[in-house]
């Protein structure tokens, strides 16, 4: 499976909710340093990360993986 869309969505969420501040999102997702960048580059997320991101944003796991959220309404976040 290709996680390019997920990476785009992480980038979008990072920009809209965290003003591009990686450490804030990493802390909220309980991730080690550098993981946000790896997700943006296409690394597969763990189920725990997907669940936490779903809880933080309100998007479904399917939307986070398969739907380009940046192309949806600007009122998403």
Image (cartoon, rainbow, N blue to C red):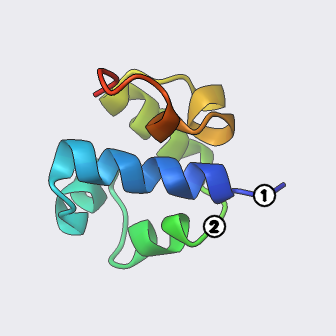
- Residue extending furthest bottom? 34
Tell me the CA gap for discs 2 and 1. Answer: 7 Å
Taking the spot 33% from the left edge, 27% from the top edge, the residue there is 74
10 Å crowding of disc 1: few (<14), some (14-19), many (20+):
few
57 and 50: which is toward the camera: 57
Residue that numbered label 1 is attached to: 2
In the rendered structure, the answer to whether residue 2 lies left or right of residue 38 reads right
Residue that numbered label 2 is attached to: 42
Q: Are marks 2 and 1 in contact (CB under 8 Å)?
A: yes
Q: Which element carries disc 2, helix, strand or loop?
A: loop
Measured from the top left, where is residue 53 in percent x and y? Answer: 41, 38
Q: Looking at the rendering, in which quadrant would you find the C terminus?
A: top left
Measured from the top left, where is residue 1 in percent x and y? Answer: 84, 54
37 and 47: which is toward the camera: 37
- Mark sitting on residue 20: none
Q: Which element carries disc 1, helix, strand or loop?
A: loop
**Is 4 located above or below residue 37 in the figure?**
above
**Is 6 located above or below residue 36 in the figure?**
above
**Is 57 located above or below residue 14 in the figure?**
above
**Is 36 located above or below residue 51 in the figure?**
below
The answer to which quarter of the image holds residue 24 is bottom left
Measured from the top left, where is residue 40 in percent x and y? Answer: 50, 66
Q: Earlier in the sequence, mark 2 or mark 1?
A: 1
10 Å crowding of disc 2: few (<14), some (14-19), many (20+):
some
Measured from the top left, where is residue 16 in percent x and y? Answer: 24, 43
């Amino acid at each position: 499976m290709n996680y390019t869309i997920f990476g785009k969505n992480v980038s979008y969420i990072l920009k809209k909710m965290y003003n591009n501040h990686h450490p804030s999102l990493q802390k909220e997702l309980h991730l080690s340093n550098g993981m946000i960048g790896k997700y943006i580059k296409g690394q597969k997320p763990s189920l725990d990360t997907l669940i936490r991101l779903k809880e933080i944003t309100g998007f479904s796991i399917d939307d986070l993986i398969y739907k380009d959220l940046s192309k949806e309404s600007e009122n998403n976040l």
